[in-house]
Image: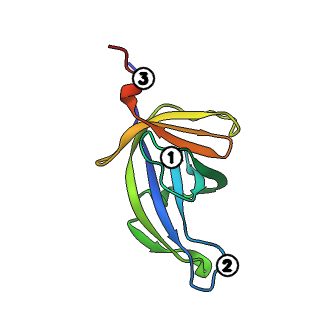
Amino acid sequence: MNKVVNKRWVILRHILPIDSLEASHFDLLLEDGDFCRTWQLKHIPRVNGPSVQALLIAPHKLHWLDRDECQISGGRGLAKRVLKGYFHGSLPKNQDELISVEISSGSISGRLEIGTNLCRLVSCSQFHVN
């Protein structure tokens, strides 16, 4: 019998130092084995809202899934957790392939789709046939 394993996800607000030339942003992390696949987002995707820009960045360590708020090493600012939850589905081995997983948390749920530089969150009810 196969046991279903819930994998974790979080969205962190990355608040950059005042003297940074870049704007603060959000980081979306999906647990993937010994690390998290990570995307930089300008905005948090809204259920059935427009797609948001998603830039794949370097994998993050798993400890970020458990942090509420933490200074980032090297004076790179502060990370504050905005959302957290679990997802169902598997991540493709090839990072260029479309990701489609069901996410849930206390405040949002839906199908998270991440493709080439875009991310969107679609209501799960749109996939159920009556």
As drawn, the label of residue 127 is: 3
**Closer to the N terminus: mark 1 or mark 3?**
1
Q: Earlier in the sequence, mark 3 or mark 2?
A: 2
**Tag 3: Cα neighbours inside 10 Å, few (<14), some, or many (≥20)?**
few
Compute the Cα span from label 3 to label 2.
42 Å
Pointers 1 and 3 in contact (C-beta within 8 Å): no
Amino acid under disc 2: Leu
Q: Is residue 80 left or right of residue 29?
A: left
Residue behind mark 1: 31
Left or right of 58 on screen, residue 33: left
Query: Which of the pair 47/84 is nearer the observer?
Result: 47
Q: Secondary structure at mark 1?
A: strand
Q: Is residue 103 visible?
A: no
User: Badge 2: how crowded within 10 Å, few (<14), some, or many (20+)?
Assistant: few
Q: Residue furthest left?
A: 106
Q: Amino acid at mark 3?
A: Phe
The residue beneath circle 2 is 21
- The local crowd at label 1, few if under 14, some if 14 to 19, many if 20 or more residues have their Cα within 10 Å, is many
* Residue 12, numbered label: none
Q: Is residue 89 visible?
A: yes
Indicate which label's residue lies in the foreground, 1 or 3: 3
- What's the residue type where badge 1 is placed? Glu
The residue under the point 48% across, 31% down is: 89
Separation of marks 1 and 3 at Cα, in angstroms: 24 Å
Question: Horizontal placement of 59 versus 43: left or right?
Answer: right
- Disc 3, SS: helix
Residue at screen point 62% across, 44% down: 118
Task: Identify the residue at image location x=52%, y=42%.
Answer: 120
Q: Is residue 10 above or below residue 104?
A: below
Q: Nearer the viewer, residue 3 or 116?
A: 116
> Is disc 2 in contact with disc 1, using a CB cutoff of under 8 Å?
no
